[in-house]
Amino acid sequence: MKRIDSVKDYFPESQPLSKLIAPVVEILPVAQIKNVCFVNYTESSKDYYCDRPCDTEFNANIADNMSIWLHGESGTGKTALVARNLSLANVKHLSCSLEPVTIDSCESIFRGLIEDIAEYVKINDIPKELSIKNMSNFLLNCQFDDNTVITIDEMSCSNSAIIEEFCQKIMRLVSYYQKSEPSKNIVFVISSIFHPKQHGCHPGKLMESFQFVCSTDWGGDIEKLFEIQNTALGNMICEEGKCIMLKSCKNLPRLLTLIMQRVYRGKNFSIESVTSVTERVNREYQEYE
C-alpha cells in the first residue's frame, strides 16, 4: 500500500486552513449622537459636517481678507458654517454673540458687540457714546493682531427700523475702521437671518464693505447630510424611512438633525416609529418657530 505523506498528497487541490477561514472584519465603533447631530460645531463634529458650495465661497473670501455678510433663513447652518471654516483658517477668531443681548435698539447691538470685544482684549475703557468715530477709535485701541476675524452672530432682530439703522452704521464702521488700520488684515463676519440689501443700504457702498454669502440653499445637499449622519450612527434607517424624513424636514438641516437624533435615541427603526417620530418633531418645531 502507498504511504500518504501528507493531506496535500491525498487532496492535491486542498487549501491552507488560513485561506478557508473568512478574514476578521474590523467593526468600527458607532459615533456619538451628540457629535454627529451637533448643535454647536466642535472639533469632535468635523467628520460629520456637510460641506457645500457656500463653504467654498466663504473660505475664498476669508483667504482674500474680505469681510462677509452671511445671511440665510433660521436653521440653515450659519453658525456652524462660520465656526467650522474659521477653525480651518489661519486666523485669530474673536466671536461676539448677540444671543444674550436684548435687542431693543441699534445701540443695544453695538453695546453688546463692544462689551464682548472689551472682555476679549481685557480693556475697561468702553466709550459711552457709540458714534462711528468712537467705536472705530475703540477698535484701534484694541490693537488686534494681523489676520484677526471678528464675527457678529445671532443677529436675529425682526424690527425693521433697528435693522436698517444697524446695517447703515455697521457698513460705515467697517469702512471707517479699515481705512484707519490699513496695515492689518482685520475681517468682519456678520451672520443674520436677513439680507442687508433689503434694508435701505446703498448697494454700491455695502458691496465695498462686505461680500455676501447665503446659507439657505441646501438643494441636494440635504440628502448628503442625511447620508453622513445615518452612516456615522450605524446606517439603521432604511430607504423608505429616509424618504419620509427628507420630505418632512423641508430642506432645513436643523430639523433633519433633530429628527435624526430623536430616531436614534429611540432605537426603533421601523417605518411606523420613524414616521411617528418625524411627525412629532415637526409639530414641536412648528410650535417653537
Image (tube, helix red, strand yellow):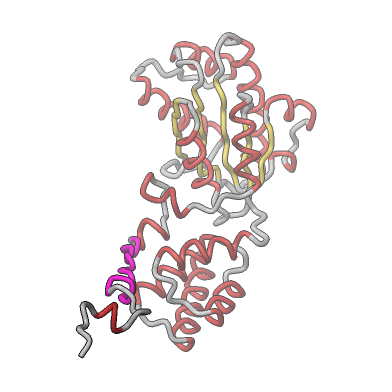
- For the image, the number of numbered tags is 0
Q: Position of residue 120 (x, y in %)?
A: 37, 25
What residue appears at the point 55 percent right and 13 percent down from the top-left corner? 184
What residue appears at the point 37 percent right and 79 percent down from the top-left corner? 13
* Left or right relative to 72: residue 149: left
Q: What segment carries the magenta color?
A: 17-31
Q: Nearer the viewer, residue 22 or 220?
A: 22
**Is residue 77 shown in magenta?**
no
Q: Nearer the viewer, residue 120 or 276?
A: 276
> Most prominent secondary structure in the magenta stretch?
loop
What residue appears at the point 20 percent right and 83 percent down from the top-left corner? 3
Quarter of the image where one finds residue 192:
top right
* Left or right relative to 276: residue 9: left
Q: Position of residue 63 (x, y in %)?
A: 60, 27
Q: Position of residue 79 (x, y in %)?
A: 50, 46
Quadrant of the rendering where the N terminus is positioned: bottom left
* Left or right relative to 105: residue 93: left
Residue 240 versus residue 222 in the image, above or below: below
Residue 282 versus residue 275 in the image, above or below: above
What residue appears at the point 61 percent right and 10 percent down from the top-left corner? 182
Quarter of the image where one finds residue 164:
top right
Q: Position of residue 156 (x, y in %)?
A: 55, 47
Residue 160 versus residue 111 in the image, above or below: below
